[in-house]
Image (cartoon, rainbow, N blue to C red):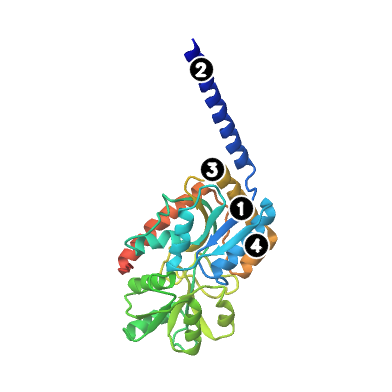
Amino acid sequence: MPGKTFLRGALLALSTMLSYAGAHAQGDTARYPDKPVTLVVPTAPAGGTDTIARLFAETLGKAMGQPFVVDNRPGANGILGAELVARSAPDGYRLLFAYAAVMAVNPSLYKKLSYDPVKDFMPVVQIGRGGNLLLVRKDFPANDLKEFVAYVKAHPDKVNYCSWGTGSGGHLAMESLMKQAGLVMTHVPYKGSGPCVQDLMGGQIDAGFADISSTVGVVRAGNVKALAYSGPSRVPLLPDVPTMNEAGYPFKNYSWYGLFAPAGTPPEIVERLNQAVNKALQDPAVKQRMHELNFTDLPANTPQEFGATLRQDLADWRTLVEAVGVKLD
């Protein structure tokens, strides 16, 4: 019958087209990357996140044979950059290099968030884990965390502290300490950690948490005092500074960097990126540079392990944010 012959021919042609398309797509995945990859960094250039992102962009470019180009998209606590990647094609050519607050803290801070860190992204690999230093001005009458707590208790609401913004890691870390120790202090939010540290050095601010990489030098020079570190282990370049856990005020909401792809990215691409980053983490030059930036906790991890870390951190940060009562529009 002509009709049946035509139908069989049409089905055969469709089957051939689908097989070709599948093989072609599989071939594209196997060749990944075959063009430059954009690495979206949701911060301004020259900060800690940007510095480490560029280190890995260079390393991945050499390892995978295509340029990894950093695209800085600062603004709104990292929301603008994360939203851009969440709405991008899931083909592995636009990725997000994020810090923990963008993915694990923002969902608890903002009533309406334009992206979902679990539904809109695929975790690729976690890059390190760390914390921030608790600093005080050099003439502050305390030389360790115990003395600091005692002084603030004796002078309620007389001590001020800075952070790099309401809802930032520095703000939440201090609020956590205040809640644990029963302290009352005045929060002074800044637009960045740099101005906060400058005012600590100048004596205009009493205390504050700040990142390690930009403050080790001023601590060693005696321009400020470091009382504790909120990370999981001591900083090699400041071995005498105890962790908050050691000082009796546990803090488990650690910061980290991580690589994310849009949801729906082929698992083969995610796995290839994961392996490339984990290999880079073992490269002596990369390890040395990360050590210089005081980010030394660098375990290899799978996308599944990073996903579990993200989900746990979302729950932990939600508990902390609710406990201190911080909400942003």
Marks 3 and 2, how far apart in space? 39 Å
Q: Residues within 10 Å of mark 2 (few under 14, many from 20)?
A: few
Q: How many marks?
A: 4
Marks 1 and 3, how far apart in space? 16 Å
* Label 2: element kind: helix
Residue at the image point whose x is 59% and y is 84% from the top: 221
Q: Earlier in the sequence, mark 4 or mark 3?
A: 3
According to the image, label 1 marks what residue?
Answer: 278
Query: Callout 4, which amino acid?
Result: Lys
According to the image, label 3 marks what residue?
Answer: 267
Residue 154 appears in the figure: yes
According to the image, label 2 marks what residue?
Answer: 6
* Mark drawn on residue 287: 4
Q: Earlier in the sequence, mark 3 or mark 2?
A: 2
Q: Earlier in the sequence, mark 4 or mark 1?
A: 1
Residue at the image point whose x is 57% and y is 51% from the top: 93
Comparing 44 with 178, the one in front is 44
Quadrant in the rendering for residue 30:
top right
Comparing 144 with 263, the one in front is 263
* Mark drawn on residue 234: none
Q: Residues within 10 Å of mark 4 (few under 14, many from 20)?
A: some
